[in-house]
C-alpha cells in the first residue's frame, strides 16, 4: 500500500515538473518526457537540483516558443522575438533609469556653476534619449493597436486575462506605496530622505521592488498578448525599426550615465557620498554602481534583441 502511495506521489511530482514547459510542448512530448523522468528517477524522489534543471529547461522552452531565444520559426516570428527581447530589456533599463534619477536628484544644487557643463550635457542626453525611447515604444504600440482590438473582439481576452490581472494588481500595490511614500516625503527634509537607512528608506526599497514587479508583470502580459496576435509584415517591420532605435539608445544612455558619474566624482564627490560640500569622500557608491551594472545588462540584452531583428529583416522583406 505504501509502495503504491510513493509511486502515485512520484507521478504527481513528475506531472508538476512538466508544468514548467509550454502547453504545446507538453502536448507533443509530454508523455515521452514523463516516461523518461520516471525511468531516470526509478521511483526515487527528485532532488532539488534535478527539479531546478527541469525548471530551467522548461523556462528555456517557453522563451524559445515566444521567440526570445533561438532562431526557430518563421522570419516574422524571429523578428517579433527580437522586438520583444528589446522591449523586456527596456523594461529592465527603466528600473535602472529610475534608480539613476533618484541618485542624481538635485545634483545641480551641489555643484559650482562653472563645473556644470559636462554633467549637464550627459544628464540631459540621458533624459532626452529616455524620452525618445518612450515615444518609440508608444508608436510601436499604436501600430499593433488595431490588431489587438480585433484580437479582443474575437474572444482573445480569456487567453490573457490572468496576465493582465496580475499586472493590474501589482500596479495598484505600487501606486499605493508610491503615493504613501510621496506624502511622507513631503514632511521630511532632503537630509532625512537621503541619509542613513531608516523607516523611510526601508519603505522606499519596498516601493522600488513593487515598481520592478509592476514592470515585470506588464512585460509578461505584453509578451503573452503579442505572441497571440496575427501581426502582418508591415506592422512587424515598423515595430522592428522602433526596437532598433531603443536598442541603440540604451548603450548611449549607459555611457552618458557613466560620464555623469565621472564628472560628478571629479567636481562634486560630496554629492555622490551625501557628505558636506567641500569634502573629499570616495565617489564610488553602491547604489550608483548597481544602477550602471543593471544598465549594462539591459543594454546587452537590447543589442541581442536588435541583432535578431536585423538578421530577420531581409527574410521579412522578401516574404
Image: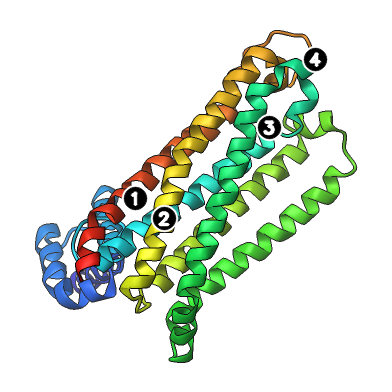
- Disc 1 is placed on an element classified as helix
Q: Nearer the viewer, residue 214 or 47?
A: 214
Residue 6, quarter of picture: bottom left
In the rendered picture of this protein, how many numbered marks are placed on residues?
Answer: 4
Mark 2 = which residue?
A: 243
Q: Nearer the viewer, residue 81 or 232?
A: 232
Q: Dot 1, crowdedness within 10 Å: few (<14), some or many (≥20)?
A: many
Q: Which mark is residue 306?
A: 1
What residue lies at 77% left-to-right and 32% top-to-bottom?
A: 106
Name the spot of residue 317 as percent of width and height, x first. Answer: 24, 65
Q: Earlier in the sequence, mark 4 or mark 1?
A: 4
Dot placed on the residue nearer the N-terminal end, 4 or 3: 3
Disc 4 designates what residue? 276
Snapshot quadrant of residue 80: bottom left
CB contact under 8 Å: marks 2 and 1:
yes
Q: Which residue is mark 3?
A: 104
Q: Residue at x 42, y 81 (%)?
A: 159
- The disc, 4 or 2, on the residue closer to the chain's N-terminal end is 2
Amino acid at each position: 500500500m505504501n509502495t503504491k502511495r510513493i509511486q502515485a506521489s512520484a507521478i504527481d511530482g513528475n506531472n508538476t515538473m512538466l508544468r514548467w514547459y509550454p502547453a504545446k510542448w507538453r502536448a507533443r512530448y509530454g508523455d515521452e518526457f514523463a516516461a523518461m523522468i520516471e525511468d531516470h528517477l526509478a521511483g526515487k524522489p527528485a532532488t532539488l537540483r534535478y527539479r531546478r534543471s527541469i525548471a530551467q529547461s522548461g523556462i528555456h522552452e517557453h522563451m524559445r516558443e515566444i521567440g526570445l531565444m533561438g532562431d526557430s520559426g518563421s522570419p516574422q516570428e524571429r523578428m517579433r522575438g527580437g522586438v520583444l527581447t528589446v522591449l523586456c530589456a527596456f523594461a529592465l533599463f527603466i528600473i535602472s533609469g529610475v534608480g539613476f534619477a533618484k541618485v542624481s536628484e538635485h545634483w545641480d544644487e551641489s555643484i559650482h556653476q562653472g563645473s556644470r557643463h559636462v554633467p549637464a550635457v550627459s544628464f540631459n542626453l540621458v533624459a532626452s534619449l529616455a524620452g525618445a525611447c518612450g515615444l518609440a515604444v508608444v508608436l510601436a504600440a499604436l501600430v499593433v493597436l488595431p490588431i489587438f482590438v480585433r484580437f479582443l473582439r474575437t474572444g482573445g481576452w480569456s487567453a490573457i486575462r490572468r496576465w493582465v490581472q496580475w499586472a493590474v494588481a501589482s500596479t495598484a500595490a505600487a501606486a499605493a506605496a508610491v503615493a504613501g511614500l510621496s506624502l511622507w516625503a513631503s514632511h521630511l527634509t532632503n537630509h532625512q530622505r537621503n541619509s542613513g537607512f531608516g523607516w523611510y528608506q526601508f519603505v522606499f526599497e519596498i516601493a522600488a521592488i513593487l515598481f520592478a514587479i509592476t514592470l515585470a508583470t506588464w512585460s509578461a502580459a505584453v509578451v503573452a498578448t503579442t505572441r497571440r496576435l496575427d501581426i502582418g509584415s508591415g506592422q512587424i517591420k515598423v515595430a522592428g525599426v522602433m526596437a532598433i532605435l531603443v536598442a541603440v539608445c540604451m548603450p548611449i544612455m549607459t555611457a552618458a550615465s557613466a560620464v555623469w558619474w565621472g564628472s560628478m566624482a571629479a567636481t562634486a564627490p560630496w554629492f555622490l557620498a551625501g557628505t558636506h560640500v567641500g569634502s573629499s569622500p570616495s565617489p564610488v557608491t553602491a547604489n550608483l554602481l548597481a544602477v550602471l551594472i543593471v544598465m549594462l545588462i539591459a543594454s546587452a540584452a537590447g543589442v541581442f534583441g536588435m541583432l535578431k531583428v536585423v538578421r530577420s529583416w531581409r527574410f521579412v522583406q522578401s516574404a
